[in-house]
Amino acid sequence: MTLPTFEPGTPVVPVVAPGHGLALAWGSSTWATRTPDPVGTLAQLEASHPRWVWWRARDTATGWIAAGLRPRSCWDLGAVGRLVHGLDRDDPAATWAAAHGLPLPDPAEGALTLLDLEGEGPEPVRADGQLSREWLREGWCSDLESAQRWAGLALQVHIRQSAEVARLPDARPAPSTPSLPHLTALSESMAALLAVELEHDGLAIDRDVLEAFLTATVGPRPRSDADEVASRRARDELVWRHFGGDPMDLRNPATVRDLLARHGIAVPDTRSWRLEAYAADSPGVAALLTWRKTERIATTYGWSWVERDIAGDDRLRGQWSAAEGAGRMTASAGLHNMPTELRPAVRPPAGRVLVRADLGQIEPRVLAAVSGDRALAAAAGEDDMYAPVAAALRSDRATAKVAVLAAMYGQTSGPAGEALRDMERAYPVAMAYLREAEAHGRRGADLRTYGGRLLRLSHLADRLARSGGADSTLAHSYGRFARNAMVQGAAAELFKAWAATVRAGLADSDARIVLCLHDELLVECRADDADRVSGVVIEGLARTASWWAGGSAVRFVADVATVRDWSQAH
């Protein structure tokens, strides 16, 4: 079998048709081969360093990664569709429709019905321009010819998306080639691939440490429903004994509020932050707050979580999304909300360690870069940017931090209001950037982040119109969302670009990124490779910042440490 060759970076669409073989499309060419090992063939083609183009990584790359193939470069049509068109889904039907300016079809679910068959034919594209439902339900893999046609359709979308990305403005102070939107499309694509790898690799858990903690905290592993009920009662009794009387339902906020009122503590609600003021003088309130932390572990990270989400190889696995909301990576199985108390159990096997890197003060530094505020950029040149901000505001560091966060989150009440007035004086360009974003949100106007992500707010305009302008709360909430999303979204783009750069630097080694937590990376590697990996992480941030924030003079910093378990880095 003679394999095709490509120039490095050539966009190539691969389609594996199970039981038939492999089809490719690139440029004006197609190619297909009958092979029982299509991933093996792809591994050989990887040596030419093409840029693989696929509908979405979850559908295509999962099998590659399971077979040991980790591509160096890709263009994920679903991820770029989310970026360019502001889609909240990445399936081929939506990606195709958005690329062709068509209405988004309803998600295809279940078997075809007679109504679904209306307008369907043997062709992959229907008369109305939408993709055929039959082809979407894997009609493309019926034979190699169909696989080639499916690859050709994906290549069409890639061409259209590339043209759309090329038309987006480059927001950097000193634009260069490739453009920032193009680089963002590539890093978002790599983040989609990384999400699949994170699901496959999982996060190492020391089961002995975890189970010892759970036993001491929530009780022994229940062997029956009766054991579980007894364990819950034992935890509840640690609170009941401080209040006396009949047992109460501690999981009902109204019941807890009435219980506290009968003991002289009148509160409008039972939020933990409100009760903390009473804990020092009330053993019962202190016990209640401790119970809540324990209950969260028992219900979300307890024995059922261990059995459901931690596999026999002692790896915690969840489903990852490369871009939710304003663009952050998210994960299921509790990976993004793990309590600090459980972090000692995040521990790789003997001989391996974690390199943990945490971006410092990322959102205010991003605000300095995206707004073009030179005074704030100068402050971001320091290791601790809140120190020069405090000097500019003539305040202490704590007040300066409140002021910056209040500006980004649109908080105007209390001490934040006065701090914001000082921010207006010291950093007028950054504040004008945030006000403009908020104004767009208030009137339901679309925005694009620094890297080019479309934040669809126009669909909210109808709700605002129906309220006749009377619903100021609705407009205010949209405004605050837009204000924060422009910063948070850009920060997510920077983080994913950094992660993609680190991933590239770890190629050809057994080091793996195992967690992406907002602005924190965890890399698992051999202990004797930790110094090199730390260097890759640090250099990766410098390289990413050099093009992402080129010309802004903003400095990005990361706290990097090598640890045996996750808790040692905090």
Image (cartoon, rainbow, N blue to C red):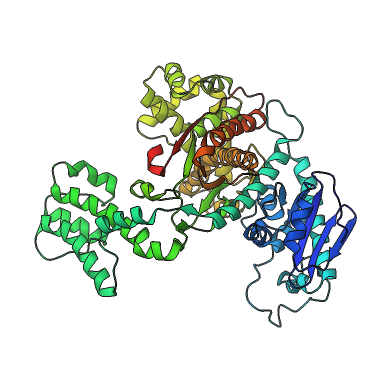
Disc tally is 0
At x 16%, y 54%, the residue is: 260
Which residue reaches farthest left? 244
Image-based side of 372 in relation to 289, left or right: right
Quarter of the picture containing the C terminus is top left
Image position, residue 207 (x, y; %): 38, 56
Viewer can see residue 458: no
At x 86%, y 56%, the residue is: 3
Q: Is residue 224 above or below residue 295?
A: below
Closer to us: 560 or 228: 560
Q: Is residue 458 above or below residue 142?
A: above
Quarter of the picture containing the N terminus is bottom right
Viewer can see residue 352: yes
At x 45%, y 23%, the residue is: 384
Which residue reaches farthest right? 28
Closer to us: 482 or 146: 146
Q: Is residue 382 above or below residue 523?
A: above
Closer to us: 543 or 272: 543
Image position, residue 161 (x, y; %): 76, 49
Image position, residue 272 (x, y; %): 28, 48
Q: Is residue 550 above or below residue 227?
A: above
Image-based side of 462 in relation to 18, left or right: left
Image position, residue 367 (x, y; %): 55, 31
Asked where in the image residue 298 lies, by quadrant, the reply is bottom left
